[in-house]
């Protein structure tokens, strides 16, 4: 009889302890998130033709921006993001040329429920990229002088990441993203395959 009461007492204590431990914070349905991020952009060739015997390239540089997200369920969400990268076009006969790259994205996000504060996710979406060259890219192609200006184009991206919830509201976000850029110049244009790695801090409400 004494053993039975001890078992019941231990079970009761365990239940009380479990109820006293707060549930792990994670993605919740019908919630909004906002976050700011910064990281690195890894570039690619800008043109499909050499300019004065050299291939212009989008340099590896910093990227940063803002995101807004809405979680329809604990698994599915939608992100809208605005990104900016003050980069350079390198490999030019007259020296590097500054290029500002602005991206607008809309992505579907799927979260994996791990039952912990760490929530991995995958995402994919489409958007638009705006390029702003400081000056035209100048050189020769097949012996003829050319002047290449900036241009805009659509973009596709896909990535993986993880959200770490410090509290029910405060979260940190680590992400790696592949980005396809249709073009950033108006002639001899070349589609770019770039990569971004970012770290962000956000708020869920």
Image: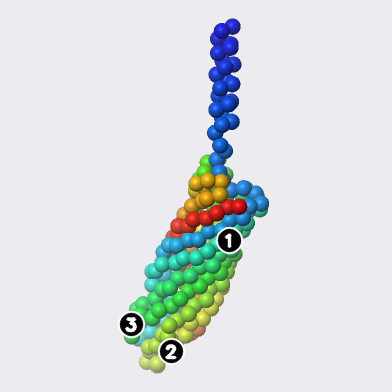
In the foreground, 193 or 78: 78
- Up/down of 31 relative to 43, above or below: above
Element at label 3 = loop
Neighbor class of circle 2 (other Cα within 10 Å; few <14, some 14-19, many 20+) is some
Task: Establish if 65 lies above or below 131.
Answer: above
Q: Secondary structure at mark 2?
A: strand
Circle 3 Cα neighbour tier, 10 Å, few/some/many (<14 / 14–19 / ≥20): few
Residue at coordinates 66% horizontally, 51% vertically from top-left? 30
Residue positioned 43% across, 78% down in the render: 99
Q: Disc 3 vs disc 1: which is toward the camera?
A: 1
**In the image shown, does 59 or 13 lie closer to the viewer?**
13
> What mark, if any, has residue 95 been given in the picture?
3
Looking at the image, which residue is at 50% across and 61% down? 36
- Quarter of the image holding residue 57? bottom left
Which sits earlier in the primary sequence, circle 2 or circle 3? Answer: 3
Q: Answer yes or no: is residue 55 visible.
A: no
Q: Residues within 10 Å of mark 1 (few under 14, many from 20)?
A: some
> Can you give x and y, in whole percent of width and height, for residue 115 in the image?
55, 40
One can see residue 137 in this view: yes
Marks 2 and 1 close (CB-CB < 8 Å) = no
Residue 16 at x, y percent in the picture: 58, 26
Q: Residue at x 59, y 16 (%)?
A: 8
Query: Compared with residue 31, is residue 37 higher up or lower down, i.e. above or below?
Result: below
Q: Earlier in the sequence, mark 2 or mark 1?
A: 1
**Any mark on residue 147, and which?**
2
In 3D space, how far apart are the residues under numbered discs 3 and 1 (Cα atoms)? 38 Å
């Amino acid at each position: 009889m004494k053993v039975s009461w001890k078992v019941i007492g231990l079970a009761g204590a365990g239940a009380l302890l479990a109820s006293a431990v707060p549930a792990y914070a994670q993605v919740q349905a019908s919630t909004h998130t906002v976050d700011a991020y910064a990281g690195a952009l890894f570039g690619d060739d800008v043109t499909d033709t050499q300019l004065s015997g050299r291939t212009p390239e989008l340099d590896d540089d910093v990227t940063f921006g803002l995101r807004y997200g809405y979680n329809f369920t604990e698994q599915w969400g939608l992100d809208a993001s605005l990104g900016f990268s003050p980069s350079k076009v390198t490999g030019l006969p007259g020296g590097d040329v500054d290029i500002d790259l602005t991206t607008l994205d809309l992505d579907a996000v799927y979260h994996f429920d791990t039952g912990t504060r760490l929530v991995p996710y995958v995402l994919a979406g489409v958007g638009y990229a705006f390029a702003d060259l400081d000056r035209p890219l100048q050189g020769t192609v097949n012996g003829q002088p050319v002047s290449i200006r900036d241009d805009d184009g659509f973009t596709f991206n896909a990535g993986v990441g993880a959200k770490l919830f410090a509290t029910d509201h405060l979260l940190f976000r680590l992400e790696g993203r592949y980005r396809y850029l249709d073009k950033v110049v108006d002639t001899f244009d070349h589609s770019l395959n770039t990569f971004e790695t970012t770290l962000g801090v956000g708020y869920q409400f």
